[in-house]
Amino acid sequence: MAGIQLDRALDNVDAAMRQLRTAVRGVPVRREGFKDSHDALARAVATLTVTLSDSRSAIKD
């Protein structure tokens, strides 16, 4: 059960990041430090998803 929940959570994060990419098209990337904030968010989300993915072996269904 926990593995299924993890898969759903990762799928939802992936969908949210795709939606964010679509939403920011056309936004001036250098305005108000947006690019730096976006890059920091993308790195943090990537770290989170990789860590969660790697933890699958520790999760027992």
Image: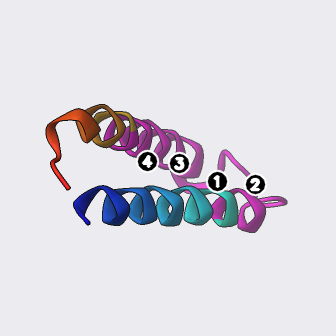
Q: Are marks 4 and 3 in contact (CB under 8 Å)?
A: yes
**Of the pair 2 and 39, the residue shown nearer to us:** 2
Residue at 39% in and 43% down: 49
Check the image and report above or below for 61 versus 30: below
Asked where in the image residue 4 lies, by quadrant, the reply is bottom left
Which numbered dot is residue 41? 4
- Label 2 vs label 4: CA separation? 17 Å
| Residue 7 in the figure: left or right of residue 35 | left
The residue under label 1 is 31
Asked if labels 2 and 1 touch by Cβ distance under 8 angstroms, the answer is yes
The correct choice, above or below, for 26 with respect to 33 in the image is: below
Q: CA distance from mark 3 to mark 1?
A: 11 Å
Query: In the visual, does 35 lie left or right of 36?
Result: right
Give the number of the disc on residue 20. Answer: none
The span from disc 4 to disc 3 (Cα, nearest Å) is 5 Å
Residue 20 image position (x, y, % from top left): 64, 63
Viewer-side label of 3, 1: 3
Q: Element type at marker 1?
A: helix
Tag on residue 28? 2
Under circle 2, the secondary element is loop
> Foreground: 39 or 56?
56
- Tell me the amino acid under the disc marked 4: Leu
Q: Which residues are magenta?
A: 20-49
Three-letter code for the amino acid on which mark 3 is drawn: His
**Quadrant location of the N terminus?**
bottom left
* Label 1 to label 4: alpha-carbon separation: 16 Å
Instruction: Please tell me how crowded label 2 is: few (under 14), some (14-19), or many (20+) other residues with Cα within 10 Å.
Output: few
The residue at the far front in this view is: 61
